[in-house]
Image (tube, grey):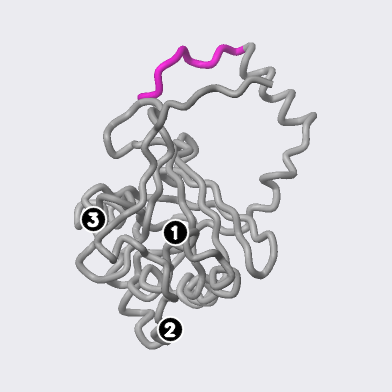
Amino acid sequence: MADAPGEPLTMGSKAKGMFSSASQNFDQISRICEHVCGFHFYAHDQTRQVHAHHLCTRVNEDFRQCIIYDSPRADARLIGIEYIISEKLFDGLPADEKKYWHSHDYEVRGGSLAMPMPKGVPEAVVQVPEKQALATLQKTYGKTWHTWQVDRGDNLPYGPAQLMMALTADGQLDPKLDEERERDEGISTQKKKEERKDYFEPYQPHAGADSWQSGNAVQVKPEEVPFKAK
């Protein structure tokens, strides 16, 4: 994260970090078991898109929680979080809550959602386990907040968190981002789409999700309010 302001870690800080990592537990992140990458756009502006790597924990069969980074590298920036729920849980949400959630069907069938693998692993080896894993995501719904607007070039996480949405049709993905992922990570959206075309059945996302399709979007704007003291 070379562009983040601040002094490089000293040897003393590195030593303290090594001691902490050896002496403390990290149970909250030890259950991370999935790594999927895709693309998000700002809920109010589809022209602003971000490459997003999700590291997810499966809480139960109906609920995942994920931390989001902007790349697969060790120096990636932590840019947000996503909660993922089953269609059963989504259907139980209040109507006013559903507008914050997006569907994953097109991302899965359209090839933009993928599971990064170590370099050198042949695509043929990846295909079957990837499709099996993504089958558990096709009919799910996500609520995503990005806390760092890296697409603006911000070197720190400025401003309020922003609600994000996901792709729902061909032609929405920024070709530049798609090309960059294929170049840097070897993931071809078009090839993924082609190899999945006979694997996944079409699915109609449930009403209330992807609310931006109505022509109106929900987004966070900061508001100054009176402080309530204890």
From where the camera sits, is residue 117 visible?
Answer: no
Q: Nearer the viewer, residue 86 or 136?
A: 86
Q: Nearer the viewer, residue 207 or 173?
A: 207
In the rendered structure, find residue 179 and report the number of the disc placed on it: 3
The segment highlighted magenta reads 3-11
Residue 39, percent from left and from top: 35, 55
Considering only order in the chain, which callout, 1 or 3, is on the residue closer to the N terminus?
1
The quadrant of the image that shows the C terminus is: top right
Residue, x 37% and y 56% (percent of image)? Answer: 165
- Seen in the image, is 221 located left or right of residue 173? right
The quadrant of the image that shows the N terminus is: top left
In the rendered structure, find residue 200 and report the number of the disc placed on it: 2
Instruction: Check if mark 3's residue and mark 1's residue have beta carbons within 8 Å.
Output: no
The Cα–Cα distance between marks 2 and 3, rounded to whole angstroms, is 24 Å
Residue, x 38% and y 80% (percent of image)? Answer: 196
Single out the mark in the foreground, 2 or 1. Answer: 2
In the rendered structure, find residue 120 and report the number of the disc placed on it: 1
Q: Mark 1 falls on what kind of element?
A: loop
Q: Residues within 10 Å of mark 2 (few under 14, many from 20)?
A: some
Compared to residue 160, the image places residue 17 above or below, namely above
Residue, x 20% and y 52% (percent of image)? Answer: 176
Dominant SS of magenta comes to: loop
Determine the image quadrant of residue 221. Answer: top left
